[in-house]
Image (cartoon, coloured by chain):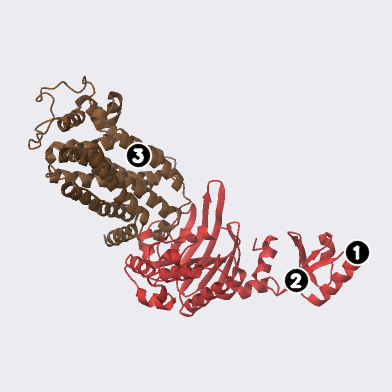
Amino acid sequence: MRNFASLTRMRIQLALRNKMFFFFSVVFPLIMFFVFSGIFAKSHPRGVRFFLGPVIAFNVMGSFWGLSAMLVTFREQGILRRFHITPVTSTDMLASSILANYVLTLPTVFIELFFARAIFHVNTFGDPLSLFVLVTVGTVSFACLGLVVASVTNTMQETQVLNQLIWLPLIFLSGALFPMGYLPKSAQNVSVFLPATYLVSGLQNAVFSSFPVRRILVQLISLAVWAILSFFVATQLFRWEPEVKIPRNAKLWAAATVLPFLFFGIWESHNRQLLDQAQAAFRAVEEPDNTSQPLKSADPSKRNLPSSGKESQPQP
Amino acid sequence: MPQPILQVDNLVKHYGDVQAVRGVSFSVDEGEVFGLLGPNGAGKTTTVEILEGLRNPDGGSVRVCGFDPQVSARELKHEIGASLQSTSLPDKLRVMEALRLFAGFYKRRRDPEELLRRFGLEEKRNTYYSKLSGGQKQRLALAMALLNDPRVLFLDEPTAGLDPQVRREIYDIIEELRREKKTILMTTHYIEEAERLCDRVAIVDHGKVIALGSPRELKQRAGGKTRIEVKLARPITNGTLQGLEGVADAREVDGTYILHTQRPPQTIVSLVKHLEAEGNELVSLEIATPSLEDVFIEMTGRRLRD
């Protein structure tokens, strides 16, 4: 526990001294925030609140990128090797990365919320507890994704290629960059297999539709299961030494981390709860101002709307 | 009779098809400075890494401070200190932060301030690791290796890649540790280092110990013969050199002829005469007092440094 705490402190210290970190974890997310709020939402409080979920999701998902790069750099430079001759364990090492990343991600989320209120006059953040719990579970689970990426790549180049390959579908197909309502049906069908979709959906439900925790359980549980599995895989595949290559069965282990969202994806394909909620939120923000009325339910049967399965694309 | 603090029996390790360590055995007593001397790729580093619990052996048995590194790696790591090759620290970690951080990992620990002073790093206390010179980095590595007041200190090539002046600085530090009766296992491919610092040396080649003893014993085993190295304008058959006066053995290593002789002056005179008679010419001639290099050449027919 002591080692875990002191390693966490070191990681936070190092990140704060790193200009790249500052850009990717603070500046870049804030640019996204202002682009979404100022341009897409035209500074309209309700629109800004609608986009807060996706904007925070960006922030939370970005965790995996920095974390995988950091861990691979540590391994390539022989830094992990130096820790290996001390009593520090791989679990200390990995868990401290996750906690440090969480502590470092949280302030940016608060800054975004602060700006949303101060500049764009967003007067409510829906259900703050739901928001907080999701940001926590989301940050931890995407950090775990980063650890898995680090464990299945040997060099920084490989890591960056894999990060790109993961990042693009995560932002394009999850509703993070384009609201789910804009996406073609085929993209929506794919999106239910992506962890990012669950995160974006949960955050939007929490902030925009004011869902309490019990109504975002699917999102929370799926992300948590994924996080636990990924963390376990990362500890199994952890390598201290730069010259130790990936074991042969590693790819299999890594592939296992896809299972939770394969399961939830199939389930969601039938259920379509997430997609309907996203559609409902999307329509709600398009509706003329009735801001005081929070969304009661996204259940299509109660809302006298055609089921989204047969629905045509809403016009932006 | 005291138990050796470090015991290696018939250690074997291979990486794929490559046999890195092929049956290495030796033991180190408490308070001894023991050296593994050999060329790069001889299996020294692998041996040390197995002893530190960083790698698992494929055969043989190892005990360090009473622990089997394979079984009790964590307990063992509280007892050992090490300065390894190709390790590093995060660029933006300050010297004192590194010492404090690593001291915190151990049950038994020494005062980081004292080590900072001892290794002459006081002025660098708040310097980022990336801003240190090679020698300062190595001094920090040694200070960090001593943080837990280890029972065995492993130094893997402690002076590799350092310039001669810094190397001497590191020698002074190791000699001081030797006077304090610290148990040290070091690897090196520098003969001077092994001769100067080690109580006993195991010469390692191709994953095997080919000679073991104190530097003096080993040199005596080479017969106390002087080494003469000559380069010639034209090649010459080995047999002719063997016949020269006083020559105990002669061989060719990478285009240089190496003679071991009990009577250097006579050998040189007879060599020059012989070359004149053959119309051959002497390009260069070097005379070296007996060293561990001669032991190595005698055992392997190769030079140690390559």
Judge left or right: residue B239 versus residue A266: right
Kindly indicate whether the residues beneath marks 1 and 3 are on one polypeptide chain. Answer: no
Rendered location of residue A60, percent (x, y):
27, 45
The answer to whether residue A231 shows anywhere in this view is no
Nearer to me, B193 or A62 = A62
Q: Which residue is mark 3?
A: A167
Indicate the amino acid at tag 1.
Gly
Gap in angstroms between the C-alphas marked 2 and 3: 64 Å
Nearer to me, B236 or A270 = A270
Q: Which residue is mark 1?
A: B279
| Chain A, colour shown | brown
**Residue at the image position 35 percent from the left and 62 percent from the top:** B75
Gap in angstroms between the C-alphas marked 1 and 3: 76 Å
Judge left or right: residue B179 versus residue A100: right
| A210 up-or-down from B154: above or below | above
Number of other residues with Cα within 10 Å of mark 2, as a class: few under 14, some 14 to 19, many 20 or more: few
Label for residue B286?
2
Chain of the residue on which disc 3 is drawn = A
Given this view, does label 1 or label 3 mark the residue nearer the observer?
3
Number of other residues with Cα within 10 Å of mark 1, as a class: few under 14, some 14 to 19, many 20 or more: few
Rendered location of residue B264, percent (x, y):
79, 75
